[in-house]
Structures are given as structure tokens and as C-alpha cells.
Amino acid sequence: MSNPGTADRPLRVAVVGSGPAGFFVAQHLLAKPDLVVTVDLYERLPTPFGLVRFGVAPDHEEIKRVTRQFDKVAAKPGFRFFGNVDVGSDVTLPELARHYHIICFTTGAETDRRMGIPGEDLARSHAATEFVAWFNGHPEYRDRQFDLSVESVAVVGVGNVAVDVARILSRTAEELSTTDIADHALEALRQSRVKEVYMLGRRGPVQAAFTNPEVKELGELAGADIHVMEDEIELDPLSRVEVEQSDDRKLQKKLEILREFAAHSPAGKPRTLTIRFLVSPVELVGNEAGQVEGLRVVRNRLVADGSGRLRPEATDQTELLPVGLVFRSVGYHGIPLARLPFDQNRGIVPNERGRVLAPPRDAPWPGVYVSGWIKRGPTGVIGTNKKDAAETVEAMLEDLAAGALPSPADPEPAAVESFVRQRQPATLTYADWQRIDKLETARGEPQGRPRVKFTSTEKILAALNREGRDR
Ligand code: FAD
Ligand code: NAP
């Protein structure tokens, strides 16, 4: 039999997860000129786009325009969206394998890394992942409570997620009220009594993970003064060598931005956002009610490890930051997927250029692939996933050409659709999403907001039932 990918035998692909990686995999496949292919994109939530909807900050609306590209992918012949279908519980991998030559997991990194210090589980200590999902209206996080009646908050980490969290905590209600932030978060943040926000970097400014436009924006907030301590951005000898040997202009620019912050005198705004360097949290201190009332940090110095990377080493100087709320923003982490191998340490599915490697011999599992954060770990911006998806699609096409893909028992598109609908009668199509999109946009219009999100699956289904769902 000839390889699939022709008009009489189209290649059938299932992609699991509709974040950037899932859409980019679909885009690359559907753009191949000599390949006849169908792509079914599965998403466990009723809405598409993963972290573009539930991660990207509400005050960064322009970043979300990438979804227009995804709309074009969805409009291509051969594309279908199966929303509100969890692969693992509603349908399983072996069940899908009956219908597809290829199954590609693009499920992201849905949980957080921990700091591993005493007090981490006290009340008022949270993962940034939860806070971000809450203010973005993720249906599974809408009922979370964050005590914003405290005056001081620490955000641990100086990556771009930490910047997002610190910025949202520092924005005025007026600034937030023109965004698509979830209504429940807008209301809670309107009542916020927070006055001091600290962002804590365990290494120095040279090593800070945030990018320049993101950190620069922290100096432009209407209601918060930025504060950086001069002695904490003074470069130690090892960092100075790193800067001298680097021809990265962005690094110079980053230091310039931070020096400007340090030189800046406060304008008397109601809040202060302080970026600290060379401090590591060692303990969250609780009050009698078991709530955070302080964060003990230790000052660090930088030392080179075997590979020349500068790592923090604790000194004997500690201090207690009197904060009543702590968000750890020390990275996301993948979660294991039913029936797939998993590298717990890295939080990824073991793979070689996107080919899933299965035990016991770590050989490629025919027809099973990964892309995005579940493939390489939780780093990189939206565009990084496009290149990553191209690599996975290349591996798929090599395997197709080599005749190495399995043959599904029932490749008819109608068969899998009726099977999925049997398991999940409330399966949503892309046309359903477009209706929701319109309704959300219309809800936002009178308030001058890009949209007002529906934040529960029930409300989405009810709205669609009123409008008439696509079948
Ligand atoms: P995700 O976007 O997480 O998508 C995974 C999808 O899989 C989700 O929709 C999930 O619901 C679905 N899924 C999971 N399990 C299943 C299952 N079992 N069955 C079906 N579906 C499933 N990048 C930028 O360029 N600009 C930014 O401003 C920016 N802001 C960010 C803000 C935050 C808080 C975070 C965390 C990241 C941000 N990024 C930003 C990075 C960017 O969002 C990521 O690079 C990108 O989203 C990773 O794509 P992904 O498809 O691998 O994962
Ligand atoms: P990240 O960039 O990897 O940053 C993680 C931060 O946590 C680093 O500062 C790291 O410090 C620190 N950290 C890790 N373990 C720690 C510990 N035990 N104690 C103290 N600090 C610790 O991850 P992220 O912020 O979660 O972002 C994920 C990805 O999404 C990144 O690629 C980011 O650029 C992207 N993103 C982009 C945007 C945007 O473009 N606007 C917005 C949000 C996210 P060390 O460096 O010392 O390890």
C-alpha cells in the first residue's frame, strides 16, 4: 500500500492542545503543497489558544493578535476543532490511535515549580501560575481567592511571568478597566490595599531572565514608582567579565534601564514596585492563623560553576521582608499525560526532535509526537513554538516518507467525530468558538474593553445554547 498523504488516502493527524504549538503544527502541516492531510485539533477547555488566552497579560492586548493567524489556520479545508474534549479522560490515546496515522501532543506545561523552602504551603503563599490563570479568567481558577487586603507582596523570580504578576498588582483599576482581565479579578484588584510589591532575583541584573521591553514598562506605570537599589545592580567582577565579553547589545540596554531606575527619584505614586537582586527566599514566616506575614531572604554572591555559569551562593546575611502575600514565579512545569512516558525532572515527554521516545529502549513510538512546552520545557515566547513545531512536522514527514507510520483501523473523519461526540456530547467546533468570540467582544464594547470573557464552561455552553450550537 502507498504511504498516506494522497487524495485517495489522506494523512490523518490529531493534535492535542490548542495553544500556539498546536496551531503551528496544524499550520505547517496544512501548508505542505503536495500533502493531502486533515488535522483535528483537540482542546480540553471550551476555548482555544492556551496561554495566549490564559497566560498573556490582559494589558498586553497586541500580543494576542497572533490569534488572527490561528483563525486563518482554522479556516483551511481539512481543519477541525474539537473543544471541551480532554484527551486522557474523555477519549484516550489508544482510542484516538484507531483513527489517526499521527497523534501530536502540544499540551504545554500546566503546573508550577516549587521553591522547596519551609512555609511554602502557608495561607497567602501561591504559585504565580494560579494567579495568572485567575486574572485571565481560566475556568478552573475562577474561584481562587487571593488576599489583597495586605500592604506588601513579594513575587519570587525575575522572569517575564514575575514581571506580569508584579505589573498587574501595581496597575491602577483605571488602567486595568480597559483590558480583558476577568471581571472577578478586576473587582478584587479594584479593592486591593497593596502598596509595596517586591520582585526578587536570586542572581544579579546581568542574569535576570526578564526581557527589556517588559522590564522597561515597569518604569512607566501610572500608579507605581519603580525602585532599584544601586548597590544591588553594581556588577560583581564575574558579571563584569561576562558583560565585557558579550556583544549582546540587549544586555547593555538592560543594565541601562536598571541604572535609570536606580537613579530615578520617586514621584510619590500610591504604590512602589521594588526589584531586588542577589537575594534568595529561605523561609516563609507565618502568623498564628497560619498565614504568611514575612519572607526571610538571604543575600547571595555569585560564583562560577564548572561550566562557567554564574550561580548564587548564600552569604550569612539574612533579612526579613514584612510581606503578607507571596507569589512564587520560578517557572512552569509539565504534567504527565496518561499513557505517555514522562521525564519528571524536566517536566517534559522524552523525545527526539519531537518523536516521543518510549521505554524500555527509548525508541521512537511510531506515530506519536510532541511540540511546544511539553516537548522542550516551559521557556520561549509564542514565536519560539513556530520553529519548534516545524521541527516536529519535519520528523513526521520523514517518518511518513520512510513508511514508518502506523495504519489506523478506521481513518474516516466522520467515524472519529461521532465517537468523540458520543463521549463528549458538548464537543465544541471552531464555529462555536467564533460565536463565543463575538459575544465576548460585544460584551466588552460598551465598556471600551476588547472583550469580557466568559469564565466558566457552563456559561459558555449556556450562551451557545441560546445562540444555537454548531452541529
Ligand atoms: P499552551 O499555550 O499552554 O497550550 C497548551 C494547550 O493544551 C492548552 O490550551 C491546554 O488546555 C491544552 N491541553 C492540555 N492538556 C490537554 C489534554 N489532556 N487534552 C486536550 N487539551 C489539553 N509569549 C509571548 O510571546 N508573549 C507574551 O506576552 C507571553 N506571555 C506569557 C505569559 C505567561 C503567564 C506565560 C506562562 C507565558 C507567556 N508567553 C508569552 C509564552 C507563551 O505563552 C508560550 O510560549 C506558549 O503558550 C507555549 O505554547 P504551548 O502550545 O506549548 O502551550
Ligand atoms: P523564566 O524566564 O525561566 O524565569 C524564571 C525565574 O525564576 C528566573 O528569574 C529564575 O532565576 C527564577 N528562579 C527559578 N528557581 C528559583 C528559586 N528556587 N528561587 C528563586 N528564584 C528562582 O520563566 P517564566 O518567567 O515562568 O517565563 C516562562 C517563559 O515565558 C519565558 O521564556 C518567558 O520569556 C516567556 N514569557 C514571555 C512574556 C513576554 O514576552 N512578555 C511574558 C511572560 C512569559 P535563575 O535565572 O537564577 O534561575
Image (cartoon, rainbow, N blue to C red):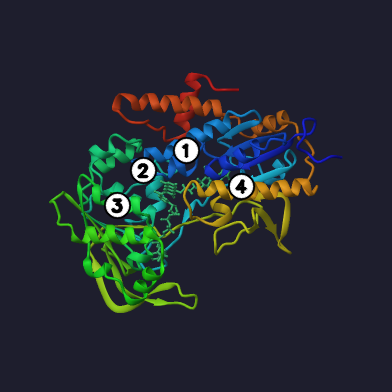
Give the CA separation, mark 1 to mark 2: 20 Å
- Please identify the quadrant where the N terminus is shown: top right
Give the CA separation, mark 4 to mark 2: 32 Å
Quadrant assignment, res 296: bottom left
Mark nearest the camera among 4 and 2 is 4
Give the CA separation, mark 3 to mark 1: 23 Å
Amino acid type of the residue that numbered disc 4 sits on in the rendered structure: Ala
Q: Which residue is mark 4?
A: 390
**Mark 2 neighbour density, 10 Å: few (under 14) some (14–19) many (20 or more):** many
Mark 2 sits near ligand 1, with its Cβ under 8 Å away: no
User: Which residue is at a point 27% across and 74% down the rendered structure image?
Assistant: 318
- Report ligand 2 position as a quadrant: bottom left
- The label shown at residue 135 is 2
Mark 1 sits near ligand 1, with its Cβ under 8 Å away: yes
Label 1 residue SS: helix
Mark 3 sits near ligand 2, with its Cβ under 8 Å away: no
